[in-house]
Image (cartoon, coloured by chain):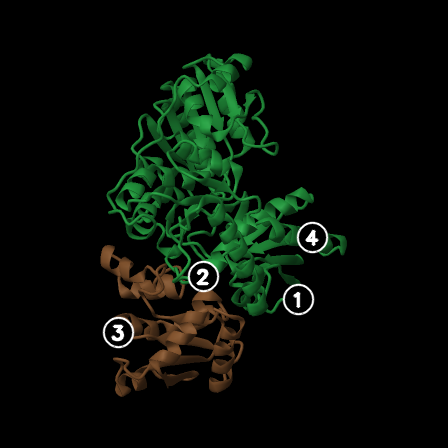
Chain colours: A green, B brown
Amino acid sequence: MYDQEIKRVKCELQKLDEEGIFENRKIGLFGFSDNSKQIIHLLRERGKNPSFVLDNDTKKQNSLCAGVEVLAVQMLESLQEECVILIYSKFWQEMEKQILSISANNIYVYVMYKRNISFNEVYEEAENGEKLYYQLTKEFGCNKLFLCPYTGTGDIYLIGTFWEAYVKKNNLKEYIFIVITSACEKVTRLFEIKNVVALKRKDDSERLIQYYMMNRETVDLKLLNDSWAKDHANVIEWFRGFKGLNFRIMFSKFVFDFPSDSWGKHAKTNLFCQEVKSIFQKQNLEEGKTVVISPYSNTLSELPDVFWIKIAKALKHKGYIVCTNCGNEKESEIKGTIRVSFPLHYAPQFVQKAGFFLGVRSGFCDIVSGTSARKVILYNRDERFYNSSAYEYFSLNETYICEETYELELDLKKLEEGFKDVLQLLVNEKI
Amino acid sequence: MDRNDYDVWKRFVAKYGITESSIMLMLTNDNSLLDRYAIEYLDAYMRRKFSKSAFIFYTEKSSLSLDERHVFQSNGIKYVSISKEEMQELYNLYCSYEFNKNIVFTYINYPETNLLQRILNETEINEKEIVCLALYKLREIPK
């Protein structure tokens, strides 16, 4: 969900809340997805904590979706309390039917997904996309567009590692490279990518795609993604993680047409970055003795604060300076650590200088993967991504050629054991 | 593409009596084995969609024999023969606008962003897996 759609869903939630629909009822969502995660966050902003997420995929059951337990739909049969199930999915029709097939009168279903989008609406979207297309092509004097319609900074980094080879292979002279956030734009600066445009409105990327979809033969636009849902002619998303098709292979093969065994090339790290140097000075950080912790992730689940607080305390006790990388105002530093914030194109230099990195798998890990700092990357053992575990799909060591990178799948029920392993991997010491 | 292109779908609905809950499987004959698996797993797709009726549209040049159609035929499934052009015209519209969530085409190499032929050629994934995971999105292969 982007811009307008988030606003619409936010308004709907507010309306339901004001009407008292959530009062004395458990709140559930149907479908483990990024959209459900966004709705969970929107509910939390209103002080409402969802109790469960339903999913038919047995591999996802008993895992966590934005910290909320994922359960089988059948659990509704034995649920005594009243509950409200929110659905935001393009599969809303069968989801609604499935819930309604459970003859219980304590369940209320709300479909938040925009049910029917008319041809006229889509046509209008394409017309707006066309205007933008001509505006961009006129500005840059070329009509070849590459579009990254996602907010994932890790995806942009991965794209960047293959870009030079792709440009060379296809003898690309002029093109426009479109991203949808300023964070993504910062990541492109790490690579030799020309004519980068960060769209002011994320929805504009959907308009461009719709224009392309209605004029596939004439509009020269390539989506830099293995399977973007809006383009429903591309149906390969459920092969993610299937038969060894991991993050790197899906992109190298199905975005760039490179063989499966292709590896990208890291961004060059400028070790003499003045901006990084001044942050170190200002914050009293010490080169080679600082641990950057990165507890936030958009795609994968995060770990409880108590875990980080304990880790930070142990590291400080051992003489390390510990800082938390905070990407925006909503991300606060872990208690007892120094808050650091810097544009993403300084991230490799920053982590390189710090010497140590510890984080949950996120786009930030991709960006710092080329550094020689000692890095420990954490995954939730129970977390799935399509047809594999999150670790199998996103493993940093399987995505890039990395130095000093250790990866660990944590059992959230046994975090105490994980805590010891993390410290040993990070600083080679038994605590 | 212009605003009138949507009429292709409206005509199709009227001509074949498509209802809101109808499942439509469009056998394109791009890959006959894939078409067969699409028929074989149609019941799993219907269960997933909570639907009790389906149309199987096939082109005159389909590799399915009349006998085979009879074998696969079961309650609630109706076989309809249409022209290749009619199917292609409908798919062209579908590639621009997902006019219905219950329609599945077995094209594998058109348009450019349809990567199924490449999946078959360049990975260990087979036709059955394409049907269950990509076309029907069943999440796994039913046993």
Q: Which amino acid does label 2 sit on?
A: Met
Give a yes or no on whether discs 4 and 2 share a subunit: yes
User: Which circle's residue, 2 or 1, is located before the other in the chain?
Assistant: 1
Q: Where is residue A179 in the image (x, y as percent from the top left)?
A: 48, 43
Look at the image and tell me whether residue A374 can be seen.
yes
Look at the image and tell me whether residue A70 can be seen.
no
Question: Are there few (<14), some (14-19), or many (20+) residues within 10 Å of tag 3?
Answer: some
| Element carrying mark 2 | helix
Residue at screen point 28% across, 65% down? B127
Q: Mark 1 lies on which chain?
A: A
Mark 1 — residue?
A: A105
Q: How far apart are marks 3 and 4 (CA)?
A: 49 Å
Q: How far apart are marks 3 and 2 (CA)?
A: 27 Å
Mark 4 — residue?
A: A11
Q: Position of residue A84 (x, y in %)?
A: 65, 57
Q: What residue type is labelled 3?
A: Ser
Residue at screen point 28% across, 50% down? A257
Q: Which chain carries label 2?
A: A
The residue sitting at the right extreme is A19
Q: How far apart are marks 1 and 3 (CA)?
A: 47 Å
Q: What residue type is labelled 1?
A: Asn
